[in-house]
Structure formats: structure tokens, C-alpha cells
Image (tube, rainbow, N blue to C red):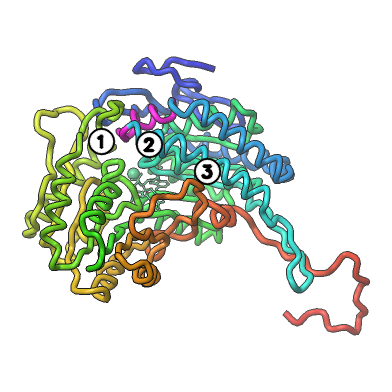
Amino acid sequence: MSTTMPGSDTMPFPPNSVYIAGEWISSPDLERLPVLNPASEEVIGSIVDASPAEVEAAFAAARAALPTWSATAPGERADVLDRLADAFREHGEELAVLASREIGMPIKESRAGQADLPERVLRSTADIARNFPWEARDASGTTVIREPVGVVLGITPWNFPVHQIVAKLAPALAAGCTIVLKPAELTPLNGLFVAALCERIGVPSGVVNVLTGRGATTGEALVQSGQYDLVSFTGSLAVGRHIGAVAGDRVVRATLELGGKSPAVVLDDADVEAAVRATVRNCFTNAGQKCNAPTRLIVPEARREEAVSIAASAAAAYVLGDPLDENSTMGPLASAEQREKVLSCVEGARARGARVAGGGAVDGVNRGYFVRPAIITDVEPDDPVVQEEIFGPVLVVLGHEGEDDAVRLANDTPYGLSAEVWSGNPARAADLARRIHAGQVRVNGVRTPALPISPFGGYKASGLGRELGPFGLEEYVEVKAVLGDPSDSIPSKEEPQCVL
Ligand code: NAP
Ligand code: MG
């Protein structure tokens, strides 16, 4: 099952194929799309732009596999997730290298986020599934049954490609759903790699199907097909809005994980240097292409200059280079389009009078979509660089006049995905966390727990629904209440039966 790809890669799947009903399918009639390495601009592979015929076939396969898969015992499905986790462990380095080559993520970040994290998500979802209340009696005597929602459509972006796929695949499989996945056009090989691992560990045919292609063609055909019972989308606000509208029209559930413009709020009693350094690190992971990156640093106005200078020197210390070089701390942006977007956001702010440290091209580098990290200050709170998601290595520093003002600024964007709060007083930090409108709040730079089960998702325009852990799994189940104890006698005709 090993095949040579353009660029001399060895991939565990045949080139220019999609995975439907346990088969690798290719057709010379389908348009080929190149896959580039954004650090070198070299072609590392190619994919097909799947057509409505493949869309139809993939949903037919998922629908056909549903009765048998949904009838398996939850423990059996959890065992499948554990076997998939074992395969992720075995092939972790290949997945990490591929992620670095597809999006330019530094290899250490790829190992942590695209191999180790998905493996932990698979194992933790398996454990949750083994202990989930699939069938439980409530206080009224009613039996509440959680059933798989059905066929799932999963559409994912490129920035954390493997993690975003697994955050949908794991709960779908655990719940007894079947799934059709469309990975992003920039990072499709990772999605096909995951399909190959599913095949290798014996996930039954049709349970997992992976189609490649453009969002506007394959993605749109998938969304418009109406063949799914849940669409789980991660990506931009614009596309999420569109998918949510289509789903709403069909009264189909949509889980939307969209963008962010997350604040890091530093109070006057915090260790400013530690807070700024941690915020820079967190903001510039994956060159800032992270939906929950803290991109607005909100510090006491009296400490703003100091914060800008610490942030600027931390930003200048980044080593931009080949993502596969262990010494690189920042890779390129994922595409030429992304690079142009980021550069124009920074230039726009500068033209409106903002002060910018860093930013722009990297001296002496004329290949790859590299952009030097930028620190921006002297901007109005309603400036586009403060309000809009940039998705690049750009940190904006704002000053606040006290805690209430800081909260006002923190909540003053359309988004609410995540936030960070910093205070020397734990009770004050906890109080501040409650005042911020976001799905996740980190206190004093706490690291992500090793067990990836905390709910992840957004308030406001950052989305609908949650991923990971028990809340993530709930999105993939339909709830049925069965009223009446089977051991009870049939009520007599005179008894009132219908009050609700
Ligand atoms: P995007 O353009 O919305 O694309 C996301 C996915 O949707 C891709 O697979 C894309 O295909 C597909 N797509 C595009 N148009 C479509 C359509 N009309 N119908 C169906 N599918 C369509 O987002 P992106 O540029 O890849 O990713 C960056 C965005 O994702 C940022 O805004 C970021 O904040 C957000 N994000 C959010 C989270 C979260 O969990 N909240 C996580 C990561 C990223 P193509 O790749 O072919 O365009
Ligand atoms: Mg896109």
C-alpha cells in the first residue's frame, strides 16, 4: 500500500485518490490540484478536486455503513479508537513531518500538535465513550437514550490539520456515526494519511470516507448535498455562516468552530514581563495561524511602553527558517495568499498611524511565504487590526485604565473563542475570568492540560457548539426519551395520559 508521490515522498495511499467505502478511487477526469511546501514553494504532491459523483458515492457509503456501525457496542468502538491511537503513535513522526511540509509548522510544534495531541484525543475519547451515559434512567423514571446522530460531514481548515480532523473523527466514531471528511485544500495529504491509518487498523468500509478538493467546488457540493445529519465545520466566519445557513434551512445540526481575536488581559498586580513573554509565545505558535491565539495584549496604560518593548525584543528573537530544522522557531505562513493578507493588514495599520515593530519580509530570503513577526501599538480599539482576525504573527498591544476598562476592551470584538488573564492575586484573576465572554479562559499562563477533554469552542461569532471531551461527544448524539417502565401495567383508559 506504499506508493511514491511527486517530490519522492512515500505515502501510505495511492496518488490522486479519494477514500470511499474502503477503496482508493481515482479518475483521470478529475482536475489535479498541486500541494505546495510553503517554505520552499516546491510541489510535494497532488490531489483531485472531487466532483459531485464522488460526493454522492461518499455519502452513499457512509449511509450504507451506518446501521451496522451504529449497532456496535460503545466499548467495541472505543477499542477501535485505541487501535487508531496506537497507529498514530507508530506513525507520529511521519504525520508530524508531513504537517510541517504541508503548512510550514516548526517540526517541534507539529510533533506536539499534529501527532501527540491527536493520539491523546483518540485515547481520551475512547475512555469517555466507555463511561458515557448511553442509556440512563432520569428521576422521573424515563429512560434517556443517546443515539448516534447519523452521517456526519466534517470540513476542516489547514492550520492544525491533523488535530482538527481527529477532533471530529474521534467523537463521530465513538458515538457510532459514520463520516465524510473534507480536509483543507492546503493540507489534504494529512487527511488522506488519516484515512490510510483507519484502513490499516480495520475501521469497517464506509465508516470513514475522505474527499479532497476545493472548498468552493467539493466543499460546496458536500454542503449542498443534504445527505448528512450533522455538519461539523472548523474554519472561517464567512464560510461558517454560509454552512450554518444551509444547515438551518434543512433543520440539520451544525457545529461551527470559527475564528477568534482573543485577548490577554494583564492587571496592574501581574508580573508584566512574564505575561508579555508568555503571550508572545502563545500568539506566535504556528506563525500566529491559530484560532485561539491571544492577539490582543491588554496591559495597564502606564506599563504599555514597557510591554511593547519586551514584546518587540521577544518577537525579534524568533528564528525563521525551514520548519524541518529543529532550530527554527517560526516557519512560513501557509500560503502566498495568507502572506499577502497578513502583510496588507500590517501595512494598513501603519498607514492609519499605528506604530509597528518588526513585520514585513525576511532579509535575504526570497523563497517561501515567510513574514517577520510584528508588534503593533498606538491603534484605536475600533481599528481593523484590533477587531479582525489576521491569522499571522501579529500582536496588538492596547492600554487599559483599570479592571473595568480592561474587561470592556477584552469583550469588545465580535469574537469570543478564548482569553488569558494575568493577576498576582488568584481570586482577582478568577473573578476576571468570569467577566470575559469566551469559551476558554486561561489563568496566569497555565499550560494546556495533558488530558485533552476541556470543552473548546466559541461564544458570539466564534461559533456554535463545543469540541473535545464529553461536551464534544454530546454534539454527535441525538437524545431519545422513552417514557414508561416496561414492567408497569398498561394505564386504564380513564387515566389522563397526555398533559404535555
Ligand atoms: P476556510 O476558508 O473557512 O476553510 C475551512 C474549510 O472549509 C476548508 O476545508 C475549505 O476548503 C472549506 N470551504 C471553503 N469554502 C467552502 C464552501 N463554500 N463550502 C464548503 N466548504 C468550504 O478557513 P481557512 O482559511 O482554511 O482557515 C482559517 C480560518 O479557520 C480562520 O478564520 C481560523 O480562525 C479558523 N479556525 C477556527 C478554529 C476553531 O476551532 N474555532 C480552528 C482553526 C481555524 P479549502 O481549503 O479548499 O478552501
Ligand atoms: Mg480557505
Circle 2: element type: loop
Circle 1: element type: loop
Queried on whether the Cβ of the residue with tag 1 lies below 8 angstroms from ligand 1, the answer reads no
- Residue 149: x and y, percent? 63, 53
Residue that mark 1 sits on: 329
Query: Ligand 2 is located in which of the four quadrants?
Result: top left
For the residues marked 2 and 1, what is the alpha-carbon distance in whole angstroms?
A: 25 Å
Q: Residue at the spot x=67%, y=39% of the render? A: 65
Residue that mark 3 sits on: 121
Amino acid type for the residue under numbered disc 1: Thr
Residue 185, disc: 2
Circle 3: element type: helix
Q: Callout 1: 10 Å neighbours few (<14), some, many (20+)?
A: many
Magenta-colored span: 94-106
Q: Residue at the spot x=67%, y=48% of the render? A: 130
Is 11 magenta? The answer is no
Mark 3 or mark 1: name the one nearer the start of the chain.
3
Secondary structure predominantly adopted by residues drawn in magenta:
helix
- Residue 210: x and y, percent? 51, 35
Q: Between label 2 and label 1, give the one nearer the viewer.
A: 1
Q: Residue at the spot x=46%, y=55% of the render? A: 456
